[in-house]
Amino acid sequence: MINLEKPYLKLLNSILKKHIPDYTVWIFGSRATEHIKPYSDIDLAIMTQRPLSVSTMSELTNALSESDLPYKVDLVDWSRIDDSFKKIIEKQHDVIT
């Protein structure tokens, strides 16, 4: 379940496809559940084998923060997080792109 209004999901997808077209992105946290609050942020995991470059991550972060999305977006690079965090994400996620 992706708990995000359709116009915002469409905008999010377009930003992701523009900046990281070759990567799958998972949504996790409260927006991947029914336990959402009006102010819940958007948690995204970029499924990488190797870390994204600093410039790519920076450009994506800037594009998201400058967009019309009314929510804060938190990004994690899969190759940079520890296994215990990966297990938490794997339990409850949905594929965005």
Image (tube, helix red, strand yellow):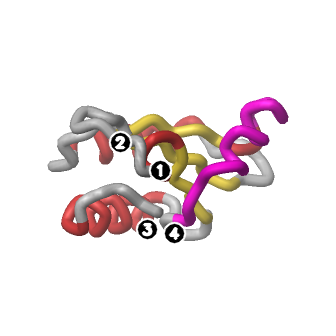
Image marks 4 and 2: residues in contact by CB distance under 8 Å = no
User: Along the polypeptide, which appears first: circle 3 or circle 2?
Assistant: 3
What secondary structure is found at the residue carrying circle 2?
loop
Left or right of residue 30: residue 70? left
Residue matched to label 4: 97
Badge 2: residue crowd in 10 Å (few <14, some 14–19, many ≥20): some
Per the model, the C-alpha gap separating discs 3 and 2 is 25 Å
Query: Real-space Cα distance between discs 1 and 3?
Result: 24 Å
* Residue 35 image point, x, y percent: 41, 42
Give the residue at x 33% y 59%.
Answer: 12
Instruction: Give the Cα separation between the discs numbered 4 and 2.
Output: 21 Å
Q: Callout 1 environment at 10 Å: few (<14), some (14 to 19), or many (20+)? A: some
Viewer-closest of 95 and 35: 35
Question: What kind of residue is marked 4?
Answer: Thr
Residue 17's disc is: 3
Please tell me how crowded label 4 is: few (under 14), some (14-19), or many (20+) other residues with Cα within 10 Å.
Answer: some
Tag 1–tag 2 contact (CB < 8 Å): yes
Residue 13 horizontal/vertical position (percent): 37, 66
Disc 4 vs disc 3: Cβ atoms closer than 8 Å?
yes
Q: Residue furthest right?
A: 83
Q: Amino acid at mark 2?
A: Ile
Instruction: Tell whether label 2 touches label 3 (CB within 8 Å).
Output: no
Query: Residue 36 — which label?
Result: 2
Rendered position, 50 above or below 84 = below
* Label at residue 70: none
Residue that badge 1 annotates: 33
Determine the residue positioned at 29% across, 36% down. Answer: 37
Question: Mark 1: which amino acid?
Answer: Thr
Q: Residue 94's image quarter?
A: bottom right
Q: Give the extent of the magenta segment.
A: 80-95
Residue 39, relative to residue 26: is it above or below?
above
